[in-house]
Image (spheres, helix red, strand yellow):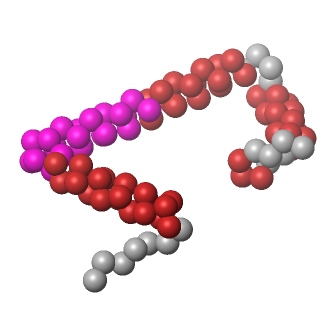
């Protein structure tokens, strides 16, 4: 059986689809799908705008280099964990 997110299986999805068809009718489904798609695009565009604004502000205030340094340190720790199986302590 195919495992889907939120532990919803295929038969359960089919039942939900049937209920949706019974409640809204088959003629309203394309309109509902378009509305959902528009909402998803709006959310995606809003998150992209927020990401761009955060990046722009970080660049203006010089945080980009700090982020790069932190990212490189994280990568070093990841590499150490992969090589040894544990984190090496520096004392």
Q: Nearer the viewer, residue 62 or 75?
A: 75
At x 77% / y 52%, what residue is drawn?
Answer: 7
Q: Is residue 57 magenta?
A: yes
Q: Nearer the viewer, residue 78 or 56?
A: 78
The majority secondary structure of the magenta stretch comes to: helix
Is residue 34 positioned above or below 74 on the image?
Answer: above
Quadrant location of residue 73? bottom left
At a point 49% along the width and 61% down the height, the residue shown is 83
- Whether residue 19 is visible: no
State whether residue 42 is above or below residue 4. Answer: above
Looking at the rendering, the stretch of residues picked out in magenta corresponds to 44-64
Q: Residue at x 31, y 39 (%)?
A: 51
Q: How many numbered marks, from 0 up? A: 0
Q: Residue 38: give x, y in percent of width and height.
A: 51, 24
Q: Is residue 63 visible?
A: yes
Residue 6 drawn at (x, y percent): 72, 52
In depth, the one of 36 and 67 nearer the eye is: 67
Q: Left or right: 4 with respect to 33?
A: right
Front residue of this view, candidates 18 and 50: 50
Residue that sits furthest to the left in the current view? 61
Identify the residue at the far bottom of this view.
91
Quarter that holds the C terminus: bottom left
Residue 20: name its quadrant. Answer: top right
- In the rendered image, residue 14 lying in the magenta stretch gets the answer no
Q: Position of residue 9 (x, y in %)?
A: 84, 45
- Using the rendered view, name the quadrant where residue 74 is placed: bottom left
- Residue 57 in percent (x, y) is at 16, 43
Q: Residue at x 90, y 43 (%)?
A: 1
Q: As drawn, is 61 to the left or to the right of 47?
A: left
């Amino acid at each position: 059986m195919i495992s889907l997110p939120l532990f919803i299986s295929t038969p359960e999805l089919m039942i939900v689809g049937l209920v949706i068809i019974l409640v809204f009718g088959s003629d309203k489904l394309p309109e509902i799908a378009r509305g959902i798609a528009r909402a998803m695009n709006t959310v995606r565009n809003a998150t992209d705008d927020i990401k761009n604004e955060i990046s722009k502000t970080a660049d203006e205030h010089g945080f980009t280099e700090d982020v790069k340094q932190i990212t490189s340190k994280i990568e070093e720790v990841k590499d150490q964990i992969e090589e040894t199986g544990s984190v090496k302590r520096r004392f």
